[in-house]
Image (tube, rainbow, N blue to C red):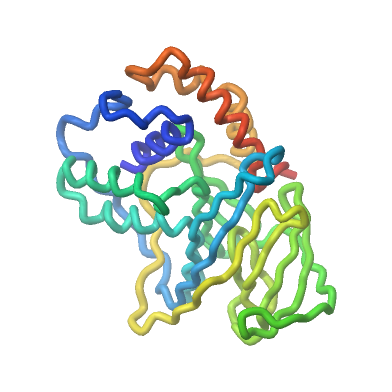
Amino acid sequence: MCKYLFILWFFLMAGLAQSQDRVLFDLSGPPLPKTEYIVLDLLLVECHYQLRFQPDSLNPEHILEEPMVLHLGQKVSSFLNYNRYLISQELKELTSNADFNRILNRSLEPGRSTVFNPHIFKNYPEGKMTTLDRVFMDSFEYEEPLYPYEWRLTGETAQWEGYAVQQALTTYGGREWVAWFAPEIPFSDGPYKFGGLPGLILRLYDTQRHYVFELTSLTPQEVPGEIEVSASRRLRTTRARFWEAERKFREDAVNIVREFLIETPADTPQRIERNMRRRNNPIELTAD
């Protein structure tokens, strides 16, 4: 089911899904199957972050913002786009294609975008970090060592949103990162793939400020929920191979997408190519 949401997102990014009389894919037929989930841990604390990022390295005026959520458990944590999380919860109640169309329409509402889509599990499996992500129609899953970088504590301190925070620096994915963590919040975790410090990371940004994560709320769960992973089939790969698949898709999106388009204007290839060129600034610039 989620692949249709991702395809719709891509067409919207390419400017191809604005006309109601244009058919992009067919959702008729029998009801779509529900996604099954596997419970990994109890959800103890929900942390919300706001992500601001610059998708086009050549256009600093174009900044996108999306809400993210970090679910902290006893042993496992989950980090993903909050809108994507809400969609996954709605899909659990899916009973018909009409319900699915309703979810699709809701996903198009202002503030419901899901451009930044990796889903990251830390300490799953134990001692590892697992990322779920997509390249167009293909779902991928790859593992890395838990916290595959080294932090350097600078000794610099500050106050942020009422918390005493300390600064730490590291390098990952071809970027230099600055983290501000709060030792009084005893969770060695943070946004995206970052953690491993003696306290929760409240602010995180690369030195060019192309990607900035900031904590907006922290809520202990009075009744513990569940941290889950979908049981959907995915292609197991490595981080380096996933990064290469993303690169190849950006370079050849027109030909890859063409076979999925049923009816489009004549300028569709040019529009796809133009919009993909504007998505030239991924959070990970290298797979080293």
Residue occupying image coordinates x 70% and y 82% = 159
Q: 28 or 37: which is nearer to us? A: 28
Residue 167 rendering spot, x and y as whole percentages: 76, 73
Residue occupying image coordinates x 45% and y 79% = 219
Q: 268 or 135: which is nearer to us? A: 268
Q: 261 or 71: which is nearer to us? A: 261
Residue extending furthest toward the right: 154
Tell me: residue 73, above or below residue 228: below
- Quarter of the image that includes the N terminus: top left
Residue 226 rendering spot, x and y as whole percentages: 36, 69
Residue 212 rendering spot, x and y as whole percentages: 64, 59
Residue occupying image coordinates x 46% and y 77% = 45
Tell me: residue 3, above or below residue 130: above
Residue extending furthest toward the front: 61
- Quarter of the image that includes the C terminus: top right
Quadrant hosting residue 160: bottom right
Tell me: residue 59, above or below residue 274: below
Position of 202 compared to 1: left or right?
Answer: right
Residue occupying image coordinates x 33% and y 17% = 263
Residue 209 rendering spot, x and y as whole percentages: 71, 55
Q: 130 or 133: which is nearer to us? A: 133
Position of 174 compared to 35: left or right?
Answer: right
